Image (spheres, grey):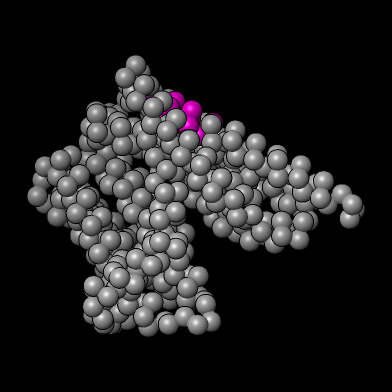
């Protein structure tokens, strides 16, 4: 939460004090970086958490394999971001800064996942605190020096990531240097076949459904057109972050209840989950209203456009909130194949709908397309959960 809070503050400052085109590039890079984090979780984080806790696990070999393959993945993702920034911005300085920021962010994210897999919560907390403190202090220094700019902000984030990563420096370098890259790739191929390839499909389809507007609007209309949509998404980010946190907390509770067929407890957990999301969304809405009156938008933004985008983003968050408890239940019961199919259908609907809406309504219309994809996913998830409830209520009825 410390890391997310610091990044949220930086994004607000960039949106408030820099031109929409620069904020649009910054926001789009963060969309790509979030995709990188999700892929890293699917390829390394979640699998590492399982493998490191197996009784016969070869800890040294696993760390060599995962640290090396993650370095290759991080380098590939950095190259992709560099190419995108060059096409969007055309500046050598910005491209270089974003490249360093992306690489260090992905490396630190993996080291963080490794710490969590080993249940070394203290190391992760210290690393996150280091990052958050440096970002906040750095923003103060940049403002005091009256040099708030994209290069300054991105260099600050890169340095903060590097300092946080340095806390595990010796440990990280030891695992990267030890062993051969070829051997690591050969070992990882087995893991890919057994675990990773299906996880990646889910990540890509989920990202396509959620961020179709970001990719299509930025590609067709440029980062300036994406900026109002990114600002609306930023204002509703607290809801998304807390939704994810609650999912992580409630998933094991739902899994335990589902395994023992405690259907009433499952339904009670779902009700509490949904009620909590309602309170979070109301609180987020109130904070947006306060921000709107306290922090005025620069004249370079069309206020009506930002208000419309914020309202549509609220609908997107509401649809996701309706689906989130039931999606968590399906994950807890191991319905991964069904969820992958739903995500694929929703992604297809979102991509087609966003393309159509951009053509006829412009950038703001793209959010309506996203709502269509989210609505389809919600209907399909709720239908699956209704079937699960019916099946388990029938099987549990003789006991009661």
How far across and down, in percent of the image, does residue 359 sit?
A: 31, 19
From the viewer's side, name the closer residue of 387 and 108: 387
How far across and down, in percent of the image, does residue 308 sit?
42, 25
- Residue at (76%, 45%) from the top-left corner? 391
Left/right placement of residue 356 relative to residue 323 reads: left
Of helix, strand and loop, which mostly describes the magenta segment?
helix
**Left or right: 261 with respect to 232?**
right
Per the rendered image, the range of residues in magenta is 366-375
Residue at horizontal 64%, vertical 54%?
333
Residue 228 appears anywhere in the view: yes
For the point 81% across and 50% down, the residue is 395
Viewer-proximal residue, 135 or 30?
30
Residue 25 vs residue 198, the one in the foreground: 198
Residue 156 is drawn in which quadrant? bottom left
Residue 234 location in percent, x, y?
A: 40, 42
The image quadrant of residue 339 is top right
For this orientation, the residue located farthest to the left is 92
Q: Residue at point 30% right, 70% down?
A: 186
Q: Residue 170 at x, y = what percent?
A: 28, 82
Q: Nearer the viewer, residue 359 or 222?
A: 359
Q: Is residue 367 magenta?
A: yes
């Amino acid at each position: 939460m410390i890391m997310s809070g610091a990044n949220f503050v930086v994004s607000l400052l960039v949106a408030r004090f820099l031109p929409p085109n620069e904020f649009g590039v910054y926001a789009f890079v963060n969309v790509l970086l979030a995709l990188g984090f999700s892929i890293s979780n699917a390829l390394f984080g979640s699998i590492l958490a399982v493998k490191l806790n197996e009784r016969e696990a070869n800890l040294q070999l696993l760390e060599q394999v995962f640290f090396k393959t993650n370095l290759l993945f991080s380098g590939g993702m950095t190259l992709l971001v560099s190419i995108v920034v060059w096409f969007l911005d055309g500046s050598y300085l910005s491209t270089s800064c974003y490249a360093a920021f992306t690489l260090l962010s992905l490396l630190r994210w993996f080291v963080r996942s490794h710490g969590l897999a080993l249940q070394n919560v203290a190391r992760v907390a210290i690393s996150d605190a280091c990052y958050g403190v440096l970002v906040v202090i750095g923003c103060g220094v940049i403002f005091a020096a009256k040099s708030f700019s994209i290069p300054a902000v991105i260099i600050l984030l890169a340095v903060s990531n590097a300092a946080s990563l340095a806390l595990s420096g010796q440990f990280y370098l030891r695992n990267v240097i030890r062993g051969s890259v070829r051997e690591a790739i050969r070992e990882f191929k087995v893991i890919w076949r057994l675990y990773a390839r299906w996880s990646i499909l889910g990540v890509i389809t989920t990202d396509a459904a959620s961020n179709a507007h970001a990719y299509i609007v930025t590609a067709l209309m440029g980062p300036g057109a994406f900026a109002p949509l990114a600002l609306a998404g930023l204002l509703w980010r607290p809801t998304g972050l807390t939704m994810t946190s609650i999912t992580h907390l409630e998933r094991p509770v739902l899994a335990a209840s589902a395994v023992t067929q405690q259907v009433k407890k499952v339904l009670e957990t779902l009700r509490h989950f949904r009620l909590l999301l309602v309170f979070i969304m109301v609180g987020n809405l109130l904070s947006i209203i306060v921000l709107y009156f306290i922090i005025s938008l620069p004249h370079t933004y069309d206020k009506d456009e930002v208000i419309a985008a914020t309202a549509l983003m609220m609908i997107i968050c509401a649809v996701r909130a309706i689906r989130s408890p039931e999606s968590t239940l399906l994950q807890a019961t191991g319905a991964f194949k069904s969820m992958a199919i739903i995500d694929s259908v929703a992604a297809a609907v979102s991509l087609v709908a966003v393309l159509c809406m951009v053509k006829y309504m412009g950038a703001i219309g793209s959010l309506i397309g996203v709502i269509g994809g989210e609505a389809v996913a919600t209907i399909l998830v709720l239908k699956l959960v209704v079937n699960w409830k019916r099946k388990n209520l029938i099987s549990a009825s003789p006991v009661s």
